[in-house]
Image: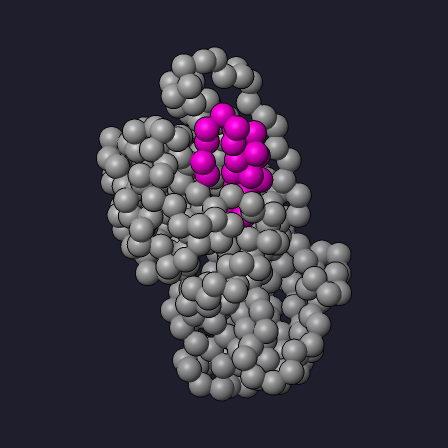
Amino acid sequence: MKVIRWKTMTLLIALMVGGICGLAIVRHIEVEAQDTQSIVGSSPLNSLSEADGWINSKPLSAKELKGKVVLVDFWDYSCINCIRAIPYIRAWADKYRNSGLVVIGVHTPEFDVEKQMPNVERAVKKFGITYPVALDSDNKIWNAFHNQYWPAHYFIDARGKVRHEHFGEGEYDQSERWIQELLKETNSKPMPATVGTVHGQGAEAAPDVNDVRSQETYIGYARADNFASHGGIKRDTQHSYTEPAHLELNHWGLSGQWLDRRQAAVLGAAGGKIIFRFHARDLHLVLGPGTEGNVYPVPGDDRRPTPRAESRCRCRYGRQWGRDR
């Protein structure tokens, strides 16, 4: 059992996606053919005009992209599955830029806080993303692509038609070969026959698929599972929670003053804890400062790194695994 303690007056816990310390592990969701609508053969790039804003680029249009091979990556900066795919997207953008590949990251948020452009800009900088990012706060581009998953990758040819699609993590060699195939077709010249090797570090590291027996949960009550503190979650009400005396595997609880909302929980006084019993290698915990009061360093944040307290999720997302909408 792992106890997470913070000395802070206002701490926003947006969601836990996880691994080994805290509250969660990533839910196993296999993408079956019947679960999502294929758009291979369609031309959805006109929907880029619906973007709420752009980072790293002026607005791009389907007309401007004609003659280019385009990779559209749907992502969300708090999604660990998207974060682990980023090293591959970055590598492809760099490797094939001069050959005519345009990578566009479409940031479609899962939570309200992720709709704020400054937050997305910080994430883009943090993850070293230099390719264009379109903000899709109202899901207009997402809906035009009939997308259902983070991450989702759409491979579009020089005529603007979707030729291949991939949902979830994994199969990166195949994805790079699709890029090579489309570039060879466009440029009428051979492309390298080999694919690159990528080794993500920290939160971007590849998952450990062999020793995960815990799944994702959320602290916000809308999607919270296995809450074990006495009396259950008190919705939208400040409440003093008591640490559970015993936790079954994958159950969790709170201790201290918390205000639990649909998408997040806010710690109302110093000394609060989240207690979680899990079985996995690492934890991915999404948290940030609240809007009220003072903010103090917490174990594992960027200002005061603590080994293992900053551990990240390493959960099973191999062939066509991803998070659904």
Residue 234 seen: yes
Residue 17 seen: no
Count the numbered circles shown.
Answer: 0
As rendered, which of 149 and 272 lies closer to the eye? 149
**Which residue shows up at 69% across the image and 70% down it?**
298
Residue 171, horizontal then vertical, whole percent:
47, 30
Residue 15, horizontal then vertical, whole percent:
50, 64
The answer to whether 180 appears left or right of 324 in the picture is right
Stretch of the chain drawn in magenta: 79-103
Look at the magenta stretch and give its main secondary structure. helix
The answer to whether 294 appears left or right of 133 in the picture is right
Which quarter of the rendering shows the N terminus?
A: bottom right
The answer to whether 266 appears left or right of 141 in the picture is right
In the image, residue 246 above or below residue 324: below
As rendered, which of 4 and 13 lies closer to the eye? 13
Residue 91, horizontal then vertical, whole percent:
57, 34
Colour theme: one colour
In the image, residue 223 above or below residue 97: below
**Which residue shows up at 30% across the image and 29% down it?**
159
In the image, residue 15 above or below residue 98: below
In the image, residue 128 above or below residue 284: above
**Which residue shows up at 37% across the image and 50% down it?**
324
As rendered, which of 178 and 260 lies closer to the eye? 178
Residue 191, horizontal then vertical, whole percent:
50, 17
As rendered, which of 46 and 137 lies closer to the eye? 46
Residue 181 inside the magenta-drawn segment: no
**Which residue shows up at 66% across the image and 43% down it?**
201
Residue 95 inside the magenta-drawn segment: yes
